[in-house]
Amino acid sequence: MTVVAVIAAVLLSFAAICTAYRVLAGPSTLDRVVGIDSLMAIAASGLAVWAAYSNDTTVIPAIVALALVGFLGSAAVTRFRVRDDR
C-alpha cells in the first residue's frame, strides 16, 4: 500500500505543478477558473489518498467541502463572466 500511495502522491504533485503553471500563465479568466477548479480536484484527490493510506476517515468532510467550494466557485465565476460578456 505504501508504494501505491507514494506513486499516487508523486503523480498528484506533478499534476498540481502543471495545473499551477496553467493558472499562472493562462491567457484568459476562464482558463484560470478551470485551472483553480482542477487544483481543487487534485487537492481532494490528495486528501483521499491520505485517507486511504492512513485509514483515517476524519478528512472525508474536508474532501466534500473542497468539492462543494470548487463547484460553487466555478459556477459563480462562470455566471458573472457570462454576464460581463453581454
Image (tube, rainbow, N blue to C red):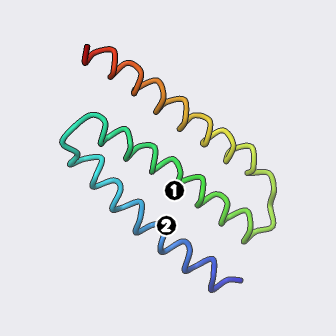
What secondary structure is found at the residue carrying circle 1? helix
Image-quadrant location for residue 48: bottom right
Q: Which residue is mark 1?
A: 42
Q: Which residue is mark 2?
A: 12
Q: Name the spot of residue 5 as percent of width and height, x first.
A: 63, 77
Q: Quadrant of the N terminus?
A: bottom right
Q: Name the spot of residue 14 as percent of width and height, x first.
A: 40, 69
Q: Residue drawn at (51%, 47%), measured in percent from left and top?
A: 40
Mark 1 or mark 2: which comes first in sequence?
Answer: 2
Distance of label 1 from label 2 (alpha carbons): 6 Å
Q: Which residue occupies the extreme bottom position in the image? A: 3
Residue 83 image label: none
Q: Give the answer, above or below, for where 65 lies relative to 57.
A: above
Drawn side of residue 27 relative to residue 44, left or right: left
Q: Quadrant of the C terminus?
A: top left
Residue kind at label 1, given as amino acid type: Ile
Q: Give the answer, above or below, for where 46 lies relative to 8.
A: above
> Crowding near pointer 1: few (<14 within 10 Å), some, many (20+)?
some
What secondary structure is found at the residue carrying circle 2? helix
Q: Name the spot of residue 63 as percent of width and height, x first.
A: 67, 48
